[in-house]
Image (spheres, grey):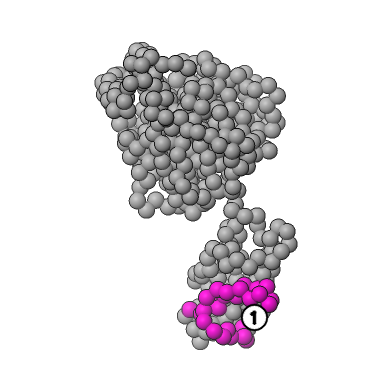
């Protein structure tokens, strides 16, 4: 592909200046459908400049052979803002999201990592953000749902897209479009806020039973518990005209102007804009477990851990890394013109262990351990890996913690007195003779307690104690 020299000479600052003019232009618009159509030449011109800038500055990420390890992410395609430069050492990933020029990863510890375009603070994660269960990336804003059912937003707020509706609770999932936001509640209803220029906030009357949501640039899709899909908002490219008779859907995705649905039989259906083949499904595509829709490209993850891509390849967004396997989740930059792709392996860091124990003197959860406050007792156990071999690495134990419990909840349970007291210091060690982990626990004050042993696979074992003087 050749580009005229006057385009290739554009610098990043020229593109950003145009973007600023574009935002200022849109801010003065009434945002009816007519004005949006009048703005499309600006979108097109800006896209040309971004393409030229990316090609001129090397803003297309290189691909290389990759077999994804559990908890890791890879990226490819457009990279002029570093959106495909996955942070070194990023592990423990539980979910991924891709916006216009930025990417997000949710980690298993409930924290969020962001990288790429940060014009508006969209990758500046709020200080102290923890307990996150779901994430979404829009054009220049980001969303996170927390384990208490609340939502947090950051980045651009020109249309109120990060101003969370007062009293919003019970949220289980979020989605982000160009300048609007969605939340799915545990009761199966949907809440929307932000830009409503094309009716993207006008939730269809009576919409309930929703199990998943997706936000395109200026429209939305919702998957219902009966396997059907509902769409609303901008319909310029028929992206909210759900194919007649579409049922059995288990997953959905919304790109700039096209929609995708994964069916229970592992096949995919696409509809909407097809100027660049983004809904021309590859022949024989089956075994699909997840779908993602970008600006003008589409992705499908398969049950064998591979990925299939089709549609626009201007930035290499459909050029899969050679040998890419181990994929369990995918995301595609879509809202507002994103052209990069993400893939992750969300599996645990290791296969679950076989837990053996607890050994004397401490009992398993069926029996309450009766002990003395302030004494030190040895807590012993064994671990075996998937091959049946003993595990001895201390790093297999993520944490050992305890918390007070209601003594009344132990009433009626069998008890056993702790008669063996530990010798030596407190802490964790491994005894090679017995193939046992040994943790010398110095007990707290009088009361009832639950001791939690958490492994690096996130398996949790517990033991109960009733401590007296």
Q: How many marks?
A: 1
Residue at the disc numbered 1: 361
- Whether residue 177 appears in magenta in the rendering, the answer is no
Front-lying residue, 371 or 63: 63
Residue 237 position within the rendered picture, expressed as x and y whole percent measured from the top left: 49, 16
Q: Is residue 353 above or below residue 172?
A: below
Residue at 51% from the left image edge and 79% from the top image edge:
426
Residue at 37% from the left image edge and 53% from the top image edge:
128
Residue at 55% from the left image edge and 70% from the top image edge:
451
Residue 445 visible here: yes
Q: Is residue 452 above or below residue 188?
A: below
The answer to which quarter of the image holds residue 388 is bottom right
Residue at 43% from the left image edge and 36% from the top image edge:
83
Residue 171 position within the rendered picture, expressed as x and y whole percent measured from the top left: 47, 43
Front-lying residue, 420 or 184: 420
Tell me if mark 1 has few (under 14), some (14-19) or many (20+) residues whose alpha carbon lies within 10 angstroms of its own. Answer: some
Residue 249 position within the rendered picture, expressed as x and y whole percent measured from the top left: 63, 30
Residues shaded magenta:
418-444
In the structure shown, which secondary structural element does the residue marked by tag 1 occupy? loop
Front-lying residue, 20 or 409: 20
Q: Is residue 119 left or right of residue 436?
A: left
Q: Is residue 321 left or right of residue 157?
A: right
Q: Is residue 292 above or below residue 67?
A: above
Residue 198 position within the rendered picture, expressed as x and y whole percent measured from the top left: 40, 21
């Amino acid at each position: 592909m050749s580009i005229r020299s006057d385009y290739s000479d554009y610098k990043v600052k020229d593109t950003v200046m145009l973007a600023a003019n574009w935002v200022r232009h849109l801010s003065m618009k009434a945002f009816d459908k007519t004005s949006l159509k009048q703005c499309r030449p600006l979108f097109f011109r800006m896209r040309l400049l971004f393409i030229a800038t990316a090609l001129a500055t090397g803003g297309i990420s290189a691909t290389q052979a990759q077999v994804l390890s559990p908890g890791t992410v890879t990226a490819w395609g457009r990279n002029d803002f570093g959106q495909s430069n996955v942070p070194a050492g990023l592990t423990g990933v539980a979910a991924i999201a891709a916006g216009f020029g930025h990417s997000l990863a949710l980690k298993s510890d409930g924290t969020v990592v962001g990288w790429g375009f940060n014009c508006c603070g969209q990758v500046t994660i709020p200080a102290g953000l923890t307990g996150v269960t779901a994430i979404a990336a829009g054009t220049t804003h980001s969303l996170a749902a927390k384990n208490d059912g609340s939502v947090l937003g950051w980045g651009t707020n020109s249309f109120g897209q990060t101003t969370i509706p007062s009293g919003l609770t019970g949220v289980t999932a979020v989605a982000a479009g160009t300048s609007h936001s969605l939340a799915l509640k545990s009761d199966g209803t949907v809440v929307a806020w932000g830009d409503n220029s094309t009716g993207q906030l006008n939730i269809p009357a009576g919409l309930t039973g929703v199990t998943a949501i997706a936000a395109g640039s200026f429209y939305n899709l919702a998957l219902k518990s009966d396997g059907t899909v509902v769409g609303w908002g901008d319909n310029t490219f028929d992206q909210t005209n759900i194919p007649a008779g579409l049922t059995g859907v288990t997953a959905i995705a919304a790109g700039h102007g096209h929609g995708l649905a994964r069916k229970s039989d592992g096949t995919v259906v696409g509809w909407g804009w097809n100027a660049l083949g983004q809904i021309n499904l590859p022949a024989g595509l089956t075994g699909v477990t997840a779908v993602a829709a970008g600006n003008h490209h589409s992705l499908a993850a398969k049950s064998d851990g591979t990925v299939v891509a089709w549609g626009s390849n201007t930035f290499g967004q459909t050029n899969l890394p050679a040998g890419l396997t181990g994929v369990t989740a995918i995301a595609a930059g879509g809202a507002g013109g994103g052209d990069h792709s993400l893939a992750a392996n969300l599996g645990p860091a290791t296969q679950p262990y076989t837990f053996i124990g607890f050994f004397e003197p401490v009992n398993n959860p069926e029996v309450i351990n009766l002990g003395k406050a302030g004494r030190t007792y040895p807590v012993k156990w064994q671990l075996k890996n998937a091959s049946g071999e003993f595990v001895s690495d201390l790093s297999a134990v993520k944490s050992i913690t305890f918390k007070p419990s209601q003594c009344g909840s132990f009433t009626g349970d069998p008890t056993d007195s702790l008669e063996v007291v530990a010798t030596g210091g407190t802490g964790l060690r491994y005894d090679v003779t017995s193939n046992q982990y040994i943790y010398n626990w110095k007990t707290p004050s009088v009361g009832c307690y639950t001791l939690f042993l958490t492994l690096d696979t996130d398996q949790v074992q517990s033991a109960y104690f009733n401590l007296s003087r």
